[in-house]
């Protein structure tokens, strides 16, 4: 008589190494996530500013606050940070503008976002859920994974 508590680890659907990776690898995983968390908000703002400029011709703080569901004060604080990072310029009573570095960041962020979004849709995830999930995932996906997601999406494109 055998119960699941006596099942040897090798017959488990997960490998033993899946549970706890080697220390160095584990540390790199957490470091990668921490680094992604540090940049994701900056990337989200820059991407949104780029999208607003492209689709509406201007990027105003009020539009950013509304689309991100945050206060004007929160947007103002982030805009100061983006200016310090050399990603955004503004003029009094005018909209925001991306610097060259900001345009590059916005384009890269948009490309990552689109790859993840299209991948999720190709898997059959609903549009609403795919948009929500892609918003967080795009910051935490490696270049290797993005390339595989893109290949998968291209191979599963409807005819």
Image: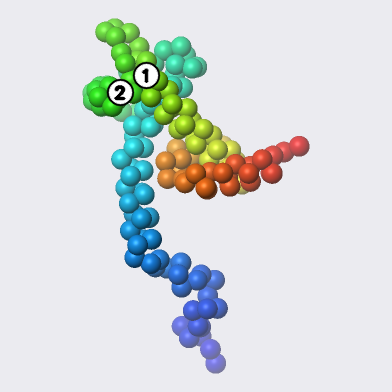
Which residue is located at x 46 percent, y 11 percent? 57
Q: Residue furthest right?
A: 159
Q: How many marks?
A: 2
| Label drawn at residue 99 | 1
Q: Are marks 1 and 2 in contact (CB under 8 Å)?
A: yes
Distance from Cα at disc 1 to Cα at disc 2: 7 Å
Residue at 30% over, 23% down: 86
Question: Left or right: 73 with respect to 25?
Answer: left
Q: Position of residue 43 (x, y in %)?
A: 38, 32
Residue that appears at 53% across and 75% down: 12
Could you say whether the residue bearing mark 2 is in a helix, strand or loop? loop
Residue 56's disc number: none
The colour mode here is rainbow
Of the 4 image quadrants, the one containing the N terminus is bottom right
Mark 1 element type: loop
> Residue 75 versus residue 86: which sits nearer the camera?
86
Residue 26, position as x, y percentages in the image: 36, 61
Please, is residue 11 above or below residue 114 in the view?
Answer: below
Left or right of 122? Residue 75 is left
Residue 79, can we see it? no
Q: Is residue 42 visible?
A: yes
Left or right, 76 with reference to 100: left
State the image coordinates of residue 33 (x, y, percent, origin top left). 36, 49
Badge 2: few (under 14), some or many (20 or more) residues near its Cα, within 10 Å? some
Local packing at callout 1 (Cα closer than 10 Å; few below 14, some 14-19, many 20+) is some
| Quadrant of the rendered image containing residue 140 | top left
The quarter in which the C terminus is drawn is top right
N-terminal of the pair, mark 1 or mark 2, is 2
Q: Which residue is mark 2?
A: 86
- Report the side of 24 relative to 132 (left or right): left
Q: Residue furthest bottom?
A: 1
Q: Position of residue 19 (x, y in %)?
A: 42, 68
């Amino acid at each position: 008589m055998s119960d699941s508590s006596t099942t040897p680890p090798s017959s488990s659907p997960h490998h033993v190494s899946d549970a706890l990776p080697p220390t160095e690898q584990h540390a790199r995983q957490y470091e990668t996530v921490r680094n992604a968390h540090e940049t994701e908000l900056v990337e989200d703002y820059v991407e949104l500013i780029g999208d607003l400029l492209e689709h509406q011709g201007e990027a105003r703080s009020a539009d950013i606050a509304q689309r991100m569901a945050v206060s004007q004060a929160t947007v103002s604080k982030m805009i100061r940070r983006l200016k310090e990072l050399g990603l955004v310029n503004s003029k009094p009573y005018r909209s925001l503008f991306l610097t060259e570095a900001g345009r590059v960041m916005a384009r890269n962020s948009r490309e990552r976002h689109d790859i993840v979004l299209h991948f999720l849709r190709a898997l059959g995830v609903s549009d609403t859920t795919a948009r929500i999930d892609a918003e967080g995932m795009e910051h935490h996906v490696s270049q290797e994974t993005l390339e595989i997601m893109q290949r998968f999406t291209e191979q599963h494109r409807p005819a």
